[in-house]
Image (spheres, rainbow, N blue to C red):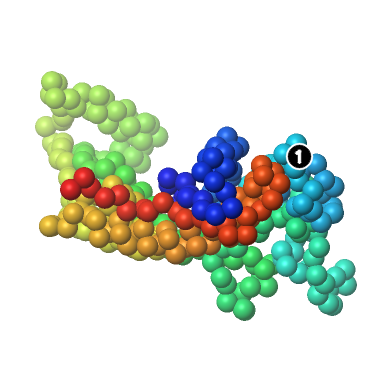
Amino acid sequence: GFRGGVTIKSKELDEDDILKLNTALDEDDDLNTVAQANKWTRLFGGGAVIIITDQDASTELDINSITEDTPLEFRAIDMWELFWSLQNTNDYALSIDGTKLTNVEYYDYYGQRLHKSRVLPMKGLIAPSFVRPRLRGWGFSVAEALVRSINQYLKATDLGFEVLDEFKLDVYRLKDLASTLGSAQGEAAVKRRMTLANWLKNYQNALVLDKEDEFDHKQLSFSGLAEAMQGIRMQVASDMRMPLTKLFGISAAGFNSGEDDIEVYNSMVESSVRNKVKYILMKVIKLKCQKLFSFVPEDLTIEFQPLREMSSE
């Protein structure tokens, strides 16, 4: 979603100012900070970007007091870091007796009180009202939809390894095996005999057995396993909303070039990644403008670079 960066537009900034702003964003790696916060949000269902200045962290952030000499840093954190000692929602919290709701003015970042104006929270997938209180006001993780399909994929992969391990099964038919195992040293003798036979069984050496013993081997069949894996891969890709060509590196089938699959994936990125993070990115760029130019342009807008890569033709 952040590929190629963003295009910043404002009539109050000339080309040199926009170049200076882009350079500052690249040097401080601010875009990747917002992207990392979005990753935590998608993974855990909540995350944030915290604003670090030389002001008291427990007070409301005064944007106008930020100058060129003011230290300014952005840090990507996940939802669990915002409630180091208090596990409640990011918008409201229960009082001590648990009977009423009170507005939360502060976050607890590893014991440090952070005023809510210094935190840019990001929520995951919206949960139904019945489940929302259990998530403490945050959202769902994208991994919630993957639990069943990922379990199927892991089990099918493990099954494939087990089939490979037992692909060729040796069968020994030993005379008087039951009576031999009944003797005191029978089990050890059978193990010793099988170990010796397995050592001798080679493409250069012959396998020597008793005249009345028999040796055979069975081979398991892989029929149906590939079709089952294909269906499981399609289920995983469907839950992840990613095409098979991108997720598993599978080439497009038939006359399909794969461009349609990538176009569907780009639409998902536009709707579920870029739209949700654009507000946070605007706040970060406005703070950078205040630091560099001592004012925030009123007509500031940003545009992401197109996701679709056009061919030379």
Outermost residue on the top side: it is 204
In the picture, residue 67 is in which quadrant? top right
Disc 1: CA contacts within 10 A as few (<14), some (14-19) or many (>=20): few
Q: Residue at x 75, y 36 (%)?
A: 69
With respect to residue 114, does 23 lie above or below? above
Instruction: Report whether 302 appears left or right of 235.
Output: right
Q: Position of residue 210 (x, y in %)?
A: 15, 30
Q: Which residue is mark 1?
A: 70
Q: Residue at x 12, y 57 (%)?
A: 255
In the picture, residue 96 is in which quadrant? bottom right
Q: Residue at x 13, y 57 (%)?
A: 254
Q: Position of residue 94 (x, y in %)?
A: 81, 71
Outermost residue on the right side: it is 97
Q: Residue at x 64, y 47 (%)?
A: 289
As rendered, which of 268 and 167 lies closer to the eye?
A: 268
Q: Position of residue 28 (x, y in %)?
A: 60, 37
Q: Amino acid at mark 1?
A: Thr
Instruction: Report whether 244 appears left or right of 304.
Output: left
Q: Secondary structure at mark 1?
A: loop
As rendered, which of 216 and 2 lies closer to the eye?
A: 2
